[in-house]
Amino acid sequence: MESKKVKNTAFLLLGALVVILCLVLVFGKRGKKDDNGITVVCSFYPVYVIAQNLLEGTGCNVVNMTENLTGCIHDYQMTTKDMKSLENASLLLVNGAGMESFLDNVKKNYPALTIVEMASTHAEEHNPHVWMNVDYEMDCIDYLSATLCKQFPRLEDKIKKNAEAFGNKVFEGPYKKKYVLSDVILEYGKDIQCICFNEAFELFTESLGLHNIAVFSLDENEQPSANEIAEAIEKAKKCEEVVVLIEEDLAFNADKIVKETGAKVIFMDPLTSGDNMDSYVNGMTDNLMAMKVLFE
């Protein structure tokens, strides 16, 4: 009888142990399914939003190194946190074309780190803000997709599916709208000249076939001088129609030009920040629709 009790106890303990092991295996796998050990660091948001879309559901850890920065990163200084991110990075995705002034230091301090420059798809372009031209954005998606597939071949199928899905979103949204707007501008019949209060907007207007008579670098630390504004006003007075492109919260910088020339103002988003994976598609669509209103 005692022997039977011992056997039953042993079976119960063994059964409990099997259940515990199964739970550990099941929940252990669940905890790790979104972490394949790959960390892809992106220099700033325009690169990050593409990487997010391409690596969605792959288990990769995608990091926006400058997540608290809402503008461009021309003069950005790397922090201790940034350096720690790079220490654990499998790959660094950057815009390139001179956008990241800290890139030489990264190459020096992390010689084994593979760095991919998104803007290399249009190395001949004088303006590094390539995401502001939808055609260039499509090229960047293709280029980064191919690069990521080469770097992480076991994720190739998923990356290609993601690239197709994201590419279709851009194509059906801002890409098509851009060409509709280009036709509207051609039919408008007036010679439109633009004044851009951000170098990113220069590439946007050029992609629509428009011309710029003045382009200013504008942020919290840099504003156009009085002489530069005066020169822009003199040029604008000789034009048939002038449009000012500027961020809404910086609009006061264009007050003098608007007052003296009667230029129309369009509030633009440089698309250097966002809160979800559709931020680029939605933001670029909004920019194009804001422009379209002028010609209706």
Image (tube, rainbow, N blue to C red):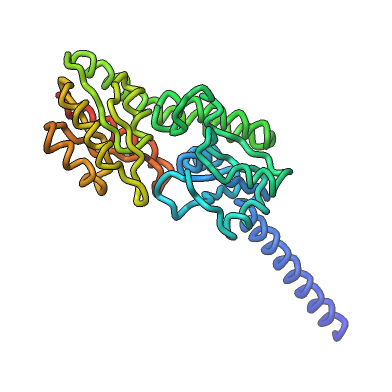
- Of 55 and 179, nearer the camera is 179
- Of 147 and 99, nearer the camera is 99
Which residue is depicted at the point 64% across and 43% down? 91
Q: Is residue 199 left or right of residue 239?
A: right
Vertical position of residue 29 compared to residue 184: above or below: below
Which residue is depicted at the point 36% across and 23% down? 207
Q: Quadrant of residue 13?
A: bottom right
- Counting the numbered discs, the total is 0
Q: Is residue 255 left or right of residue 144?
A: left
Q: What residue occupies the far bottom of the structure in this picture?
A: 2
- Of 271 and 165, nearer the camera is 271
Quarter of the image that includes the N terminus: bottom right
Vertical position of residue 8 compared to residue 122: above or below: below
Residue 176, x across and y down, in percent: 34, 22
Residue 269, x across and y down, in percent: 32, 40
Q: What residue occupies the far right of the structure in this picture?
A: 3
Residue 67, x across and y down, in percent: 47, 52
Q: Is residue 43 left or right of residue 137?
A: right
- Of 57 and 127, nearer the camera is 127
Which residue is depicted at the point 73% across and 43% down? 112
Residue 258, x across and y down, in percent: 15, 36
Quarter of the image that includes the C terminus: top left
Q: Quadrant of residue 29?
A: bottom right
Q: Is residue 170 left or right of residue 24?
A: left
Residue 40 in view in this figure: yes
Vertical position of residue 78 compared to residue 47: above or below: below
Which residue is depicted at the point 64% across and 51% down? 86
